[in-house]
């Protein structure tokens, strides 16, 4: 039997990281089993669904390289099929029209609450043997309800949570069609999972309560029951539910915040799943290793430091030309008018080991392309009269150096020796003057990359 998984987002907002992790695990399980991974857009809530949100989902999946099989399925294009099956349930006596008005439902709820019982539809329109139904009112458009079994329980072996059992008596007679005839959420999911031959439903555990309802519907439709895996929530570092307020809650925000897609998928895969002590693995390794046994059922906590650490790993190992393509637009955003390719490539090579994200990367190498300002604090700390006179001597000699990185390094060492100073006594003032900061990689390499003209210019600006 072919393994089929699906990612079924509702296009009602941004694609949040919990959703992406669901997509990632669904993708990985399908790949591991040489099965199929379907992308299904659950857009039946027409009022809340937007085309913009659909684009966000598509772009997010593309950015993360989570390729799906087949064409994207949109639920709004399948209304005929849902209606056909709603009719089948009506015909076979598993569904019925319910004319209870909103006011009546409110009244019922109030009564139940005042009696201390859990609010629930009382089944007044549910046809039973020897039961007289109320007269059909004139001005109420009916909903269609599913005749949920009243006894017994629904249980399943959740691939993450283990045995779950829910009594049918806890469940309402679910509305499967609204007054205007449109099908409701749980019904569409059931029909789609069945029609698309989904074998494994992997989703967030906010859907656990829907599962017994969906299983009841599948049984009534005589459809096979898939396996279920309900993934725990992702909490923010403060223990709260992850939300926009916590910054990078949406997938495209990660891109804008300077993360590489490989780092995001690697990090999210580790959030709640493990493979021995492995922290770094590619998407294809995930697809090879993924299993349900190593998913934790407790909530996972988002850890930005760990994400940064993983992002640094990928930045360190990314080919220079790829990084250049990502960093160049960021430099332009920061006001650089001309980005020389050679300088950019050299700067990237020099900095890539230390960078945690592409934005701070661009900030850190901006001085290669733009004039800088030295703060008074740094001036006071590093630019004493003595260091200024060292700098003067240094720049005078620098003209004579053969312009290779090696020769510049050798020259600085020789200068230190000749002046009988410690290395930082010349390196720190130079660093501050050329880069505007006191924390950079090798000053020799920086001087070599920016070139003698820029070095001379920045020194003269400071010394004047
Ligand atoms: N559309 C649902 C959501 O975005 C997911 C439904 C499912 O995976 O069954 O939460």
Image (cartoon, helix red, strand yellow):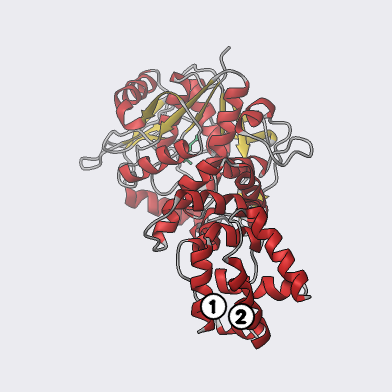
Q: Left or right: where does residue 40 sit relative to residue 34? A: left
- Between 370 and 391, the one lying in front of the other is 391
Is residue 255 among what the camera can see? no
Dividing the picture into quarters, in which one does residue 28 lie?
top right
Of all residues shown, which one is farthest toward the left? 138
Residue visible at 51% across and 58% down in the picture: 362
- State yes or no: Cβ of the residue under disc 2 lies below 8 Å from any atom of ligand 1: no
* Residue drawn 38% across the image and 49% down it: 105
Residue at the farthest front position: 400
Instruction: List the residue tagged with mark 1.
Output: 374
Residue 104 is left or right of residue 420, and the answer is left
User: Residue 460 has which mark?
Assistant: none
Q: Which SS class for mark 1? A: loop
Question: Which of the 4 quarters of the picture holds residue 42?
Answer: top left
Disc 1 to disc 2, C-alpha distance: 7 Å
Give percent across and percent down for residue 1: 58, 12
Q: Evaluate whether residue 414 shows in this view.
A: yes
Left or right, 47 with respect to 441, comes to left
Residue under label 2, please give it: 378
Q: Is residue 97 above or below residue 389?
A: above
Is the residue 43 above or below the residue 220 in the image? below
Name the residue at 56% across, 31% down. 26
Task: State the residue in front, 203 or 112.
Answer: 203
Q: Position of residue 318 (x, y in %)?
A: 59, 42
Q: In the rendered view, would you say 148 is above or below 323?
A: above
The local secondary structure at tag 2 comes to helix
Q: Neighbour class for label 1 at 10 Å: few (<14), some, many (≥20)?
A: some
Say which residue appears at 44% left-offset and 37% top-offset: 123
Closest to the observer, 360 or 76: 360
Q: Residues within 10 Å of mark 2 (few under 14, many from 20)?
A: some
- Whether pointer 1 and pointer 2 mark residues with C-beta atoms closer than 8 Å, the reply is yes
Residue 328 % position (x, y): 44, 51
């Amino acid at each position: 039997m072919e393994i089929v998984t699906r990612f079924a987002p509702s296009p009602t907002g941004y694609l949040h990281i919990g959703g992406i992790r669901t997509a990632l695990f669904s993708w990985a399980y399908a790949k591991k089993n040489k099965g199929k991974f379907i992308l299904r857009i659950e857009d039946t809530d027409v009022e809340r669904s937007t085309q913009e949100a659909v684009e966000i989902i598509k772009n997010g999946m593309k950015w993360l390289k989570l390729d799906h099989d087949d064409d994207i399925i949109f639920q709004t294009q399948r209304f005929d099929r849902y209606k056909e099956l709603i009719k089948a349930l009506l015909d076979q006596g598993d569904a019925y029209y319910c004319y209870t008005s909103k006011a009546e439902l409110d009244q019922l709820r109030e009564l139940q609450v005042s009696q201390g019982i859990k609010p629930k539809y009382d089944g007044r329109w549910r046809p039973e043997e020897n039961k007289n139904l109320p007269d059909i009112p004139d001005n109420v458009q009916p909903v269609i309800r599913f005749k949920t079994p009243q006894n017994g329980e629904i249980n399943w072996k959740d691939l993450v949570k283990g045995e779950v059992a829910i009594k049918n008596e806890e469940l309402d007679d679910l509305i499967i069609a609204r007054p205007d005839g449109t099908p409701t959420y749980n019904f569409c999911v059931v029909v789609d999972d069945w029609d698309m031959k989904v074998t494994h439903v992997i989703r967030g555990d906010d859907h656990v309560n829907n599962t017994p309802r969906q299983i009841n519907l599948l049984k009534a439709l005589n459809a096979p029951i898939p396996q279920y895996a309900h993934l725990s929530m992702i909490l923010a570092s403060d223990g709260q539910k992850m939300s926009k307020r916590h910054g990078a809650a949406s997938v495209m925000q990660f891109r804008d915040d300077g993360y590489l897609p490989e780092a995001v998928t690697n990090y999210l895969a580790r959030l709640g799943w493990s493979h021995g002590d492995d922290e770094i693995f590619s998407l294809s390794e995930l697809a090879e290793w993924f299993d349900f046994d190593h998913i934790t059922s407790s909530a996972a906590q988002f850890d930005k430091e760990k994400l940064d650490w993983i992002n640094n790993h990928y930045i360190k190992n990314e080919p220079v030309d790829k990084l250049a393509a990502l960093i160049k637009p960021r430099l332009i955003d920061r006001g650089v008018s001309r980005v020389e390719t050679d300088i950019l490539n050299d700067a990237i090579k020099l900095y890539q080991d230390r960078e945690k994200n592409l934005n701070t990367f661009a900030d850190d190498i901006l001085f290669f392309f733009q004039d800088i300002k030295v703060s008074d604090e740094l001036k006071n700390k590093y630019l004493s009269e003595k260091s200024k006179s060292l700098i003067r001597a240094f720049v005078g000699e620098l003209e004579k150096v053969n312009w290779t990185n090696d020769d510049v390094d050798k020259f600085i060492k020789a200068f230190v020796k000749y002046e009988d100073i410690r290395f930082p006594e010349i390196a720190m003032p130079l660093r501050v003057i050329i880069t505007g900061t006191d924390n950079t990689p090798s000053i020799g390499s920086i001087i070599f990359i920016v070139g003698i003209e820029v070095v001379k210019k920045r020194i003269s600006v400071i010394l004047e």
